[in-house]
Image: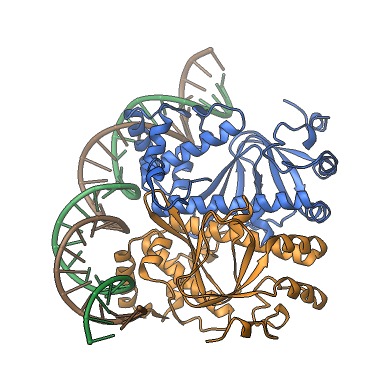
Chain colours: A blue, B orange, C green, D brown
Amino acid sequence: METAQALKTLDNTCSRCSLSEICLCSGLGEKELARLDQLLRYRKKARRGEHLFRAGDTLHSLFAIHSGFFKTYLLYADGRQQVTGFQMCGEIVGMDAISQDEHTCYAIALEDSEVCEIPFARLEKLAREMPALQRHFHRLMSREIVRDQGVILLLGAMRAEERVAALLLNLSQRYLARGYSAAEFRLRMTRKEIGSYLGLKIETVSRIFTKLQADGLISVRNKTVTLKNIAALRRLLGEEERVKSRAGNVYQVNF
Amino acid sequence: METAQALKTLDNTCSRCSLSEICLCSGLGEKELARLDQLLRYRKKARRGEHLFRAGDTLHSLFAIHSGFFKTYLLYADGRQQVTGFQMCGEIVGMDAISQDEHTCYAIALEDSEVCEIPFARLEKLAREMPALQRHFHRLMSREIVRDQGVILLLGAMRAEERVAALLLNLSQRYLARGYSAAEFRLRMTRKEIGSYLGLKIETVSRIFTKLQADGLISVRNKTVTLKNIAALRRLLGEEERVKSRAGNVYQVNF
DNA sequence: CGAAAACTTGATGGGGCTCAATGCTTGTGG
DNA sequence: CCACAAGCATTGAGCCCCATCAAGTTTTCG
C-alpha cells in the first residue's frame, strides 16, 4: 500500500492527471492549469466505508474523485435512506453544501478511493480571476442539476425494468467515457443500494436482473454485469421511439 | 392590462423590488444593487400557457420570476411528461441550461406572470467583479441541487400520502416566506400536474385530497387548499420522529 | 352559453412490496 | 488455509398500494 506521502509526487497535479478531459480542469489552458495545480495540492485517501462528509458538516472543500467509487445519500426521519447518486472518478461531490455552507447529504466510499480536495473559498477566488474556470465550474453545477432532474424523471415516470436498464446504460456510458469497457463492468454497489437509488426494493432489483438475463439482454454474475444487447436495453427505455417522435426535443436520460 | 412600456418604470429595479430578500440580489450592498439593476433592465410578460423556454433552446438568459407561477417539465420518449418543479416569485429558472448552453427542460407559465431576464454572459462577468454576487449565485445553483435531491427523496422513499403532504407543506412554507398565508392558498397547477410532479396518477391525487380532508387535516375546494392541521401533516411525514431520533442529522425535506 | 377540460368517485387489476426460507460470498480470526 | 459468521443475493407465495378503466359531475373559458 502506498503511503500518504507517496501521493504527493509529480503526478499529483491536474496537468498530468489522466482525468483532465472529464474533471474540473477540462478546457483550461496551460497557464490556468498551473494555477489550478496550486489549488489542488492535497490528495486524500478514503478507505471503503469511510465517509467523505456527512449531512451537517460545515463546507470547507469540494472533492474531485481521482479514483474509486462513492455514493451520496440522504437520511430521512425514520431512518429511511435514499441514495441520491453514484460517483466515479473525474466527478465532483459536495456541491450541495454551497447553499447553506453545510453539507445536506452523506458521501461514502464504496471502495478504496482517492480524492482531490478543493478548498471552496479558494476555488471561488480563482474562478473570479479565471473566466474559463468560472465557466467550467458553473457547467459542473448545472450538470449536477441536469443529472438530478434525470433521476427525478426516472423515479417519477419509469417502471421498474426501465429504471434498472437506465442505470445499467448510464454506468456503461460513464465507464466508456473513462476508457473502460461499456459492455462489461463490476457493480461497486450492493443490490440494496441500487434499489434505494432506483426507488425499488432489493427483491425487485434481483428479480429484474434475473429477468433481463433470461431475456438475453444482460448477464449477471455476482457483481459483474455484461450488457449483451445494448440496443435492446435502449429500446426498453423507449429511446428507439424518439426517432419516430414528432416533436424533436425529447429528453435523453442523462444522469 | 399594462403595456410592455409601463413595465419599464421606476419599480423595475432590484433595489426597489419587494422580493429582494429572496431573489438574486439577496445580501448585496447598495452599490452592488445599483450595478445589478443595470443587468436586469428587461422585464418580460408571460401569459398563462406561454413557454419561457423549451428543451433545446440556446441559453441566453436565466429568468427571475417577478410575479406569477411556473412549472418546469421534461418530455420523455413516448410522450411521457415529468414535471420537475413549480416555481414562484423570487425564484430563478433556467440554470439547467448552463451545462451545455442549451435548455434541457421546458418552462411554462401557469398563470399570467412577469419575469426579469438575466443575460447569463453578463451575469458571469458581474459575478467575477462582485464576490457577493458570485457567492449568492453559487448558493442559488446549489439550492437547486438540494431541492432536486429533496424531490428524489420524495419520489424514491415516500408513499403517496406523504408525497402529497410534503408538497402542501412545501408550498405553504414558500407562501409564508413571501408574506402570504401559510394556511390557505390557491393551487396554481392542475391535479394532473401535481400527479406528474409527485409520480402519481391524477385519480390518486384526487383520492388523497379527499382522504386528507376526511381526516380533518386539510380542506380542499377546487383549487383552494386550507391546511387545517399543519402539525398533523408534519407528523405524516415522520418529522415528529426526528426529535426522538438518535443520530441528529436527519434530512428535512426542503424543496 | 356550450364544449372541452378538469375533477371526483367506484370497481377492478397488477406491479412491486412484504414475509419467509435458502443459498452464496466475503471477510475475519483461529 | 480453513471455518464460520454476517452480510448479501435469490426465489417463491401472497398481498396491498396505487394504477387502470369507466362513468358522471363540476369548472373553466372561448
Q: Is residue A213 left or right of residue A35?
A: left
Could you say where residue B55 lies in the image, as x and y percent from the top left?
51, 56
Q: Is the residue B238 above or below the residue A247 in the image?
A: below
Q: Is residue A193 visible?
A: yes
Q: Is the residue B64 above or below the residue B18 in the image?
A: above
Q: Residue at x 85, y 41 (%)?
A: A31
**Image-quadrant location for residue D29:** bottom left
Q: Residue at x 72, y 63 (%)?
A: B123
Q: Nearer the viewer, residue A129 or A50?
A: A129
Q: Nearer the viewer, residue B245 or A82?
A: A82
Where's the C terminus of chain B, which quadrant?
bottom right
Q: Nearer the viewer, residue B18 or B12?
A: B12
Could you say where residue B254 lies in the image, as x and y percent from the top left?
55, 65
Q: Is the residue B46 above or below the residue B2 in the image?
A: above
Could you say where residue B247 lies in the image, as x and y percent from the top left?
57, 56
Q: Is residue A100 visible?
A: no
Q: Is the residue A196 above or below the residue B69 in the image?
A: above
